[in-house]
Image: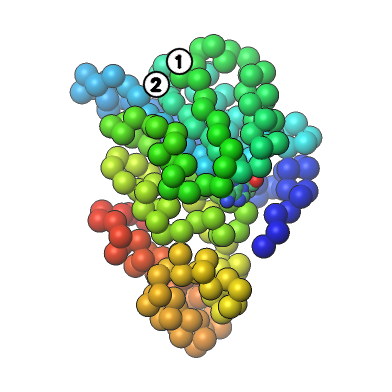
Amino acid sequence: MTEPDDFFAEPREHSQTKARIVSKYAQGWARILTDFQRGKNIEPEVAVVDLFSGPGSYEDGTPSTPILILKNAIEDIKLSSALRTYFNDHNIENCESLSEEISQLPGLPRLRYKPVIISEDATVETLNRFQVPSSIPKLFFLDPFGYKAISVALLKACLADWSECIFFFNYRRIIAAVNNPAMQQNMLALFGPSALTELRAQLAEMNDVLARERVVLDHLKKALGKLCTGVQFS
Ligand SMILES: C[S@@+](CC[C@H](N)C(=O)[O-])C[C@H]1O[C@@H](n2cnc3c(N)ncnc32)[C@H](O)[C@@H]1O
């Protein structure tokens, strides 16, 4: 799948909704965990890791997820001293734009930890390169275009230890890809061989859109359940 070159021209409604949901969730999540740490006399420290961050704002100036997360942290005294942030995008121009946007944020010096930005194809290795302290809770955000960059191995790495992961999943594209030989490797990375065979057989028997979505999600849950214990979906 080619990447849409007008994605960041101006935000569609669903992109704004997504950015609002994810940034609010990140703030609530970070508050709950840092309050918990304070209650246990642990130095409050949490990390948000966004592997597909984009340029920070749309061309019309509308801020997107990374900028909203950082703005919330700057304005929240409990988070400004506790939140570490890590951003990656394989497009170097997006990283440069994000870096510039961050440098212009009013109140940036209030953040104890400077945001870390790297530019590469997101893989498990990227997580190692960030060197996020292993003992702190982490919230991962995986929002590539489509599904190409998401594998069960990456999801597993994002769900290790004390972490949560928000990822976007386009059922329509997945269902189209399941039977497309050109997408075989991506689908194998996502579901594994036996689940993929079973999924193909089940989808062939189904027409109802919601039922098809449910069966895709069930197989993803199964694939993840095999690799990670204690995984919960919501
Ligand atoms: C949907 S956009 C992200 C939007 C961003 N989450 C936001 O809320 O503004 C997807 C981004 O992922 C980047 N990307 C796509 N494939 C990638 C990969 N394999 N590794 C790293 N970045 C990738 C693209 O350059 C693009 O900026």
Name the amino acid type tagged 1.
Arg
User: What residue sits 73% from the left and 43% below the top?
Assistant: 8
Q: Is residue 190 left or right of residue 228?
A: right
User: What residue sits 70% from the left and 59% below the top?
Assistant: 2
Look at the image and tell me whether residue 16 can be seen. Answer: no
Q: Position of residue 42 (x, y in %)?
A: 24, 21
SS class of the residue under badge 1?
A: loop
Q: Is residue 81 above or below residue 192?
A: above
Label annotation for residue 112: 1
Where's the C terminus, which quadrant? bottom left
Q: How is the image coloured?
A: rainbow
User: What residue sits 43% from the left and 52% below the top?
Assistant: 154
SS class of the residue under badge 2?
A: loop
Q: Position of residue 117 (x, y in %)?
A: 55, 31
Q: Which residue is mark 2?
A: 82
Q: Position of residue 70 (x, y in %)?
A: 54, 26
Callout 1: CB less than 8 Å from ligand 1: no
Q: Is residue 229 above or below residue 139?
A: below
The mark nearer the N terminus, 1 or 2, is 2
Where's the N terminus, which quadrant? bottom right
Classify 10 Å Cα crowding around label 1: few (below 14), some (14-19), many (20 and above).
some
Q: Is residue 196 above or below residue 165?
A: below
Q: Is residue 68 left or right of residue 221?
A: right
Q: Nearer the viewer, residue 113 or 205?
A: 113
Separation of disc 1 and disc 2 at Cα? 7 Å
Total numbered labels placed on residues in the image: 2
Q: Is residue 133 left or right of residue 124?
A: left
Name the amino acid type tagged 2.
Ala
User: What residue sits 43% from the left and 41% below the top?
Assistant: 127
* Mark 1 vs 2: CB contact within 8 A: yes
In the image as oriented, which residue stretches furthest toward the left? 40
